[in-house]
Image (cartoon, rainbow, N blue to C red):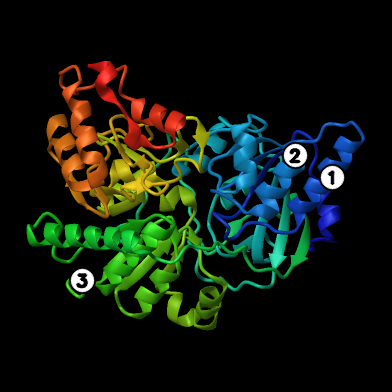
Amino acid sequence: MIYPILTPQEAACYINDGDGVGISGFTLSGTPKAVLPEVAKRAEEAHAAGKPFKINLYSGASTGDTIDGMLARAKALNFRAPFISNPTVRDAINAKEIKYTDLHLSLMAQDLRYGYLGKVDVAILEAVDITPDGKVYLTTAGGIGQTVANLADRIIIERNSFHNTIGLHDVYEPKDPPYRTEIPIYKASDRIGKPYVQVDPKKVVGIVEVNMPNEQVVFKELDPVTRKIGENVVGFILNDIKRGIIPATGLPIQSGIGNVANAVLKALGDSNELPPLDLYSEVLQDSVIELMEAGRVKAGSTCSLSLSQECLQHVYDNLDQFRDRLILRPSEISNHPEIIRRLGLIAMNTAIAVDLYGCVNSSHIGGTRLMNGIGGSGDFARNAYVSIFMCPSTQKAGAISSIVPMVTHADHTEHDVRVVVTEWGVADLRGKSPDERAKLLIENCAHPEYRNLLWDYLKITKKGHVSHNVAAALFMHATYDAEGDMRKVDWSKFV
């Protein structure tokens, strides 16, 4: 099969108003880069002419400004799932200009196959190459590439010569019920699929030639608070190993993305007491590559190489060294509950807020404003050997406490949250009653400026299995909205 070579503008003409568009990639890695900006331009031209033009966009996770940002500014998005991080699309979702469904990332491909989210008309895959018989070698992420390619009527390939990831991917798509069988991954380094996405060559409308790096995510430098959180997490893991709760050989780790996650990974690497570990996660950052080269991480299974430009080039320059130790999987597999439960992961994810009984908000500010979404945290927290949620004890220079009587939005109930860590310490909630959880969270994790305020709240609660004052439970949040500082809360009106 000889595929036509298209310009980005020509390829964009295959995408029409009302289409469902599924793309490769996961976070800023592996997403198409040339066609969707041209779709945004088409939308702007249609709107200027008084015509409708909006698409439904399906991805593995968040994307960058060249997709979410441009499409949102062009008013070209009708529906978006399952996760976002771009501020422009976030503002549009919160303004109700874009319909958004927040999903566990492990469910995205499955929900598309089940027909829950609508039709996929077009798939756009970023690839190192495509063969005449339809073997597509993806770039730096697994995402939902195979699923959207199977469902789409038309496929556009962005062949990006910047990347060289051939041999890193392990593409596997489970069968749907009632024909599903076990997923045979028994350790992080296992490979069970193919190194490519197989597509029907007849669906491929053309190839767009590209030579572009991934958009770069910039993280803040580690600070004393995040460093202390990392140290506290490592201390907790070491203590569980010494107690025999975690095997002496260690267990595979999962870590989210961001500054707190980087601090934890650095602390893991700095500890001479921990054995070398495997990583089974949805994202892999620079720190993991450094740990692999230092012998601290044996194998890295991920959905996305979320690496800096310099680190990614280093991997490409030493691909033979990394090919047997790095595995790129579809998000449905990197986040699959069955595998997470079987491998016994130590799952480490960040929280926006934690309530006194262990419920976690990881997606909405003030209960109403979407931040990014639940992402994969729920996939890992519910099924991990031990689920750890981490956050600084305060935000906004101390005006907001991360430990509160009740979260304004609950993504993870107390049933799924086993351990909470802040810079002040560790609250091990396993096997604890609600009253015991509250005591641990106040004494070990809350900032000292908020401990007495939280104890005072408990004094005015209606006692039960879980003690709450329904009228006062969200009053710390209301105080921040009114006064700009939770420390000004006054419980006297509820006595």
Q: Residues within 10 Å of mark 3 (few under 14, many from 20)?
A: some
Mark with earlier residue (1, 3): 1
Hey, what amino acid is under mark 3?
A: Pro
Vertically, is 413 above or below 83?
A: above
Mark with earlier residue (2, 3): 2
Position of 114 with respect to 163 (left or right) is left
Vertically, is 291 above or below 83?
A: below
Mark with earlier residue (1, 2): 1
In the rendered image, which residue does mark 1 sit on?
42
Asked which secondary structure carries label 1, the reply is helix
Q: Can see residue 252?
A: no
Q: Give the spatial CA distance, label 2 vs label 3.
A: 50 Å
Quadrant containing the C terminus in the rendered view: top left
| Residue reaching furthest to the left | 243
Residue 361 in the image, given as x and y percentages of width and height: 38, 37
In the rendered image, which residue does mark 2 sit on?
76
Q: Give the spatial CA distance, label 1 vs label 2.
A: 9 Å
Position of 468 with respect to 175 (left or right) is left
Tell me whether circle 2 and circle 3 mark residues in contact (CB < 8 Å). Answer: no
In the rendered image, which residue does mark 3 sit on?
275
Front-most of residues 373 and 276? 373
